[in-house]
């Protein structure tokens, strides 16, 4: 009974290819990171169980498995999701500019109450920054999203980003 799961929350990651979605998931669920840029294949989701408000919450974190082209992500991917991480690479402006599309696609498929978090990944590469933090903050504010910059490589804010999203979901659902 000690391991009884009280809630299962499906969280989906979306964003352009190579922004670091798979590595963010690997870092959060297994505390692993790989510099090898293999396209994601195989496993659809990873899980991690954590305690929120003294309840056992199992996060089921879904990865796009190489469907990152516009409109290639199927509606099955979004089905049942209670949280979403919109990930861009802060060293690649285009990946941030595409957030509008991803957000539109997400809002077209997902539940109305889905918690959405904007993630600027690779903040370890500050010297290559192509997206000013103010631009991202402004976009997040305009679209009512939480926003954080992370580094899957250095573990910066990864736990914190997932925890923020999961806690917000918990507040809505529980
Ligand atoms: P995905 O296509 O969005 O799943 O991206 P991946 O997780 O496969 O990452 C793409 C590439 O970026 C890989 O070479 C990763 O090692 C690298 N990468 C991912 N996260 C970070 C990060 O936080 N910092 C740096 N410097 N590289 C990262
Ligand atoms: Mg991937």
Image (cartoon, grey):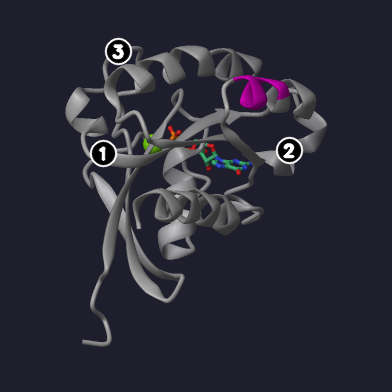
Q: Could you give the CA–CA distance between mark 3 and mark 1, rounded to whole angstroms?
A: 18 Å
Say whether disc 3 or disc 1 marks the residue closer to the N-terminus: 1
Whether residue 140 appears in magenta in the rendering, the answer is yes
**Which image quarter is the C terminus in?**
bottom left
Q: In this figure, which residue is indicated by the disc labeled 3? A: 71
- The residue drawn where x is 79% and y is 36% is 126
Residue 136 image position (x, y, % from top left): 69, 25
Front disc: 2 or 3: 3
Secondary structure category for the residue under label 3: loop
Badge 1: few (under 14), some or many (20 or more) residues near its Cα, within 10 Å?
few
Task: Name the foreground residue: 154 vs 172.
Answer: 172
- The residue drawn where x is 47% and y is 58% is 28
Residue 41, label in figure: 1
**Left or right: 132 with respect to 159?**
right
Q: Is residue 87 above or below residue 43?
A: above
- The residue drawn where x is 53% and y is 46% is 35
Residue 67, label in figure: none
């Amino acid at each position: 009974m000690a391991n009884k799961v009280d809630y299962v929350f499906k969280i989906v990651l979306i964003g352009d290819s190579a922004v670091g979605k798979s590595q963010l998931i690997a870092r959060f669920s297994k505390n692993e990171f790989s510099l090898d840029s293999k396209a994601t294949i195989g496993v659809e989701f990873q899980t991690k169980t954590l305690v929120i408000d003294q309840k056992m919450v199992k996060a089921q974190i879904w990865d796009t498995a190489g469907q990152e082209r516009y409109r290639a992500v199927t509606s099955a991917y979004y089905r049942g999701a209670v949280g979403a991480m919109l990930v861009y690479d802060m060293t690649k402006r285009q990946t941030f500019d595409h957030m509008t599309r991803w957000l539109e696609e997400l809002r077209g498929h997902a539940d109305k109450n889905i918690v959405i978090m904007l993630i600027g990944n690779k903040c370890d590469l500050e010297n290559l920054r192509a997206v000013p933090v103010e631009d991202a903050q402004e976009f997040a504010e305009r679209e009512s999203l939480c926003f954080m910059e992370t580094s899957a490589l250095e573990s910066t804010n990864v736990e914190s980003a997932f925890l923020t999203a999961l806690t917000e979901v918990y507040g809505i659902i529980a």
